[in-house]
Amino acid sequence: MSIRAWVAAIAVVAIPIAVSGQQPAGGSKNRAEKKICTVHLATGSRLDRVRRCMTRRERDEYRKEMDTDLTRQQLDRRGCAPPASC
């Protein structure tokens, strides 16, 4: 196995462990205000990762917005706009 493959394998295992082990500063935050960090693969790359930190509320809003955008894009492809019934 080449050196490059070993480095890639170690990075894949070590990055999530390092990120999940970090604790945010300030111990008296309630659950809604606590930052949660996730690591995602960058689009178009096998090795590059994107770290995104948000509170639970921000994450829920982000997911709701992404779902709404996806629904809008799917309806637009069929020639329907969301206010109209298809």
Image (tube, rainbow, N blue to C red):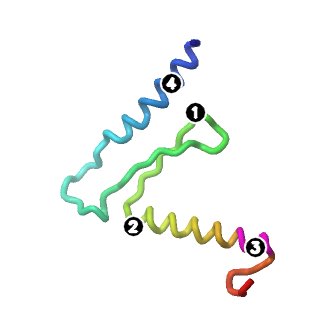
The kind of secondary structure element at disc 4 is helix
Of the residues under marks 4 and 1, which one precedes in the sequence?
4
Viewer-nearest of discs 2 and 4: 4
Viewer-nearest of discs 3 and 1: 3
Task: Give the magenta part as a residue range.
Answer: 74-78
Question: Residue 57: which numbered mark, if any?
Answer: 2
The kind of secondary structure element at disc 3 is helix
Q: Does the residue at mark 2 contact the one at mark 3 (Cβ under 8 Å)?
A: no
Q: Residue at x 55, y 13 (%)?
A: 3
Of the residues under marks 1 and 2, which one precedes in the sequence?
1
Left or right of residue 38: residue 40? right
Position in image of residue 70 (x %, y %) = 64, 66
Query: How far apart in space, not on screen, are marks 4 and 1 (Cα)?
Result: 10 Å
Hey, which quadrant is residue 42 in on the image? top right
Of the residues under marks 3 and 1, which one precedes in the sequence?
1
Please name the amino acid that badge 2 sits on: Arg
Hey, which quadrant is residue 72 in on the image? bottom right
Mark 3 crowd level (few <14, some 14–19, many ≥20, 10 Å Cα): few
Please name the amino acid that badge 3 sits on: Asp
Q: Does the residue at mark 4 contact the one at mark 3 (Cβ under 8 Å)?
A: no
Query: Residue at label 3?
Result: 76
Query: How far apart in space, not on screen, are marks 2 and 4 (Cα)?
Result: 34 Å
Q: Is residue 40 magenta?
A: no
Query: Residue at label 1?
Result: 47
Name the foreground residue: 8 vs 55. 8
Please name the amino acid that badge 4 sits on: Ala
Question: Residue 20: which numbered mark, if any?
Answer: none
Query: How far apart in space, not on screen, are marks 1 and 2 (Cα)?
Result: 29 Å
Mark 4 crowd level (few <14, some 14–19, many ≥20, 10 Å Cα): few
Viewer-nearest of discs 2 and 3: 3
